[in-house]
Image (cartoon, rainbow, N blue to C red):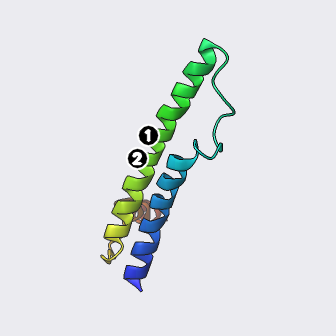
Amino acid sequence: MKKFWALFFLFWPLVALYVCWIARDRNWWFPGEAMTAMGERIEGLFYLILGIVTVVFIGLRSLWAMSSGRAQRTVPIVRQRFRTVVTAWN
């Protein structure tokens, strides 16, 4: 079952990448060429942000899919310190 979920969560980033790839050809994108220089700069910024978000999304999903097989049962440090603070307060 763990392999299923790892493959499942690896599949969706690939779908997102494919949809971004074909969006221009299917007119799912901006309506046409930019009318002004500011419009071109805004489109460039949009493409930059889209690229960064896509790379980070695929990278994090891939790392999560690869690490989902490992069981990590450790208590986070923040929780340990919170427990210490609550104990000291009482």
Q: Position of residue 21 (x, y in %)?
A: 50, 47
Give the label on residue 52, or none: 1
Q: Amino acid at mark 1?
A: Ile
Q: Position of residue 90 (x, y in %)?
A: 49, 65
Residue at image coords 37%, 54%: 59
Please indicate whether residue 35 sits to the left or right of residue 75 in the image: right
Dot 2: few (<14), some (14–19), or many (≥20) neighbours within 10 Å? some
Q: From where the camera sits, is residue 55 visible?
A: yes
- Pick the residue in front: 14 or 65: 14
Q: Quadrant of residue 83?
A: bottom left
The reply to whether dot 2 and dot 1 touch (C-beta < 8 Å) is yes
Give the label on residue 55, or none: 2
SS at badge 2: helix
Residue at image coords 39%, 82%: 2
Going by the picture, which residue comes out furthest to the front?
Answer: 25
Residue at image coords 64%, 22%: 34
Please indicate whether residue 31 sits to the left or right of residue 67 in the image: right
Please indicate whether residue 16 sits to the left or right of residue 62 in the image: right
Residue at image coords 46%, 47%: 54
Going by the picture, which residue comes out furthest to the top?
Answer: 37
Please indicate whether residue 29 sits to the left or right of residue 79 in the image: right
Q: From where the camera sits, is residue 89 visible?
A: no
Q: Amino acid at mark 2?
A: Val
